[in-house]
Amino acid sequence: MNFGPESISRSGLFFRLLRWRLRYYAAATLKLLLRRWQTWLFASLIFSPASMPLAVQIQAAGTPVRKIVEGGSASYSVAAWLTMSLVAVAWTAVQADALRGGAPWGYLRTLPGIAGLETALDFALLLVADLILMLPFVAYGIALAISGGAVSQNAGLALALAVQWPLLQQLVLRGSPAAAIVAATSLFAVLALCSELGHIVAPVLFVAGPLAALRLRDRGTWGTLLKSGSAWQGSRIGERLPPVLNLATIAILALTQWSQLPTRLALVAYVGALTWFGTAWEAIGFQPHVAAGLLLAGLVPVIFQVAGLELTLRAERSPMCPLLAALGIGEGIQLTADLLVLIGGFCLLGVAPIGTLYPLAGVRVFLIVPVGGVAVGLLSLFYAKADGTRFLPKLAVAVAFWLAVWWAVFDY
């Protein structure tokens, strides 16, 4: 393909590049989807309650946007905005290379006339990639159209709010600190909507923030901060500590490298979304038993992802295996260290969403933590000793976890 500016108009060049970026993104994300199809399958089953009428599903999906746009509770609006922002950034982080165009784009952008189109291409691609994230806004628009309320004003505010996330994602994707400007002005706009003058102040902030960020986006990047190496700079392995504790420390360092933090952010954002759902299900309109069932099922992908980190730990430790064998440190000790880290990680991640179920079942909800820890341990052993791509063992653990928790905590 000839991209030379002398042979094609600027608009023609833009659409050719966009077509190429879309094809590259589709190919790269299809590979990711094939690798993660089991998690996506569970997620699709979890968040598609067939027993709910379609109209109720649309209303429930659009509730966070409606409450932000129409104002009211500042705490709810901020929590919803923060959750949606974290999900948007995490969505970008886990597929950053595919969204950037990979190594081929690194070469293409050096050609004349192409680098200047990068921002517009990123934004256009994100509008396509973010379709699933835009579902709450689409649901709110449908609900507005059905109700026949203040469509023009509220729909305009919802549209302005929806545009903030692709802009934020584009700046994060390119490592620009100007992303903080978009995030800050968007948050202030959400808070302003909870006041009497919100419908006047918020549109100004929604426009001013992105304009200021786009002017400042080339002033520097976070690249110098996100360099290779562990986030735990200066940590030392204890010479007198038992080998299992030293190996656990090494495992934590391996999982908290700067290069891997964007991927970990996706998991944290998902847990944040679960926690928000645990506090907002009643306002959205779910029945208690439905909300409890959905939240428990929502913990299954967390178990899968945390246990799957065993593969990362084994890959990071493989160069050390000859040395560990020479020191008499067998696979049993190595696996014990991994289990300490992974089960501890699940307990830290799970305590917040699990705690939101306290009003429904009292102190018994915290039985979910050890039961989930056992599930993580079983799956980690499976990843360490068997073929991790097999589906039925994972399905068995997921079903056993859900049934055990429901029987022990909620069946009374």
Image (tube, rainbow, N blue to C red):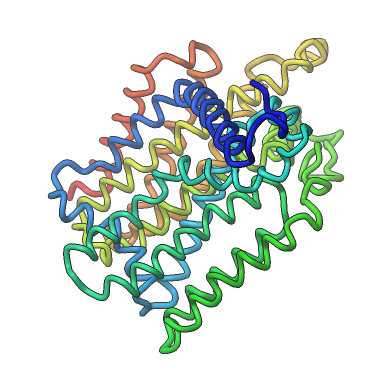
The percent position of residue 321, horizontal first and vertical second, equals 75, 14
Image quarter in which the N terminus is found:
top right
391 and 36: which one is in front?
36
The percent position of residue 33, horizontal first and vertical second, equals 45, 26
Residue 390, located in which quarter of the rendered image?
top left
Query: Left or right: 78 with respect to 216?
Result: left
Residue 340, located in which quarter of the rendered image?
top right
Residue name at image x 79 percent, y 35 percent: 241
- Say if 32 sits above or below 74 in the image: above
Query: Left or right: 80 with respect to 401?
Result: right
Residue name at image x 73 percent, y 39 percent: 113
Question: In the rendered picture of this protein, how many numbered marks are placed on residues?
Answer: 0
Query: Left or right: 250 with respect to 403?
Result: right
206 and 279: which one is in front?
206
The percent position of residue 126, horizontal first and vertical second, equals 52, 44
- Say if 33 sits above or below 358 in the image: above
246 and 105: which one is in front?
105
245 and 192: which one is in front?
192
Residue 363 in sight: no
- Say if 163 sits above or below 8 in the image: below
The percent position of residue 218, horizontal first and vertical second, equals 77, 55
Residue 131 in sight: yes
Residue name at image x 44 percent, y 74 percent: 75
Residue name at image x 83 percent, y 47 percent: 224
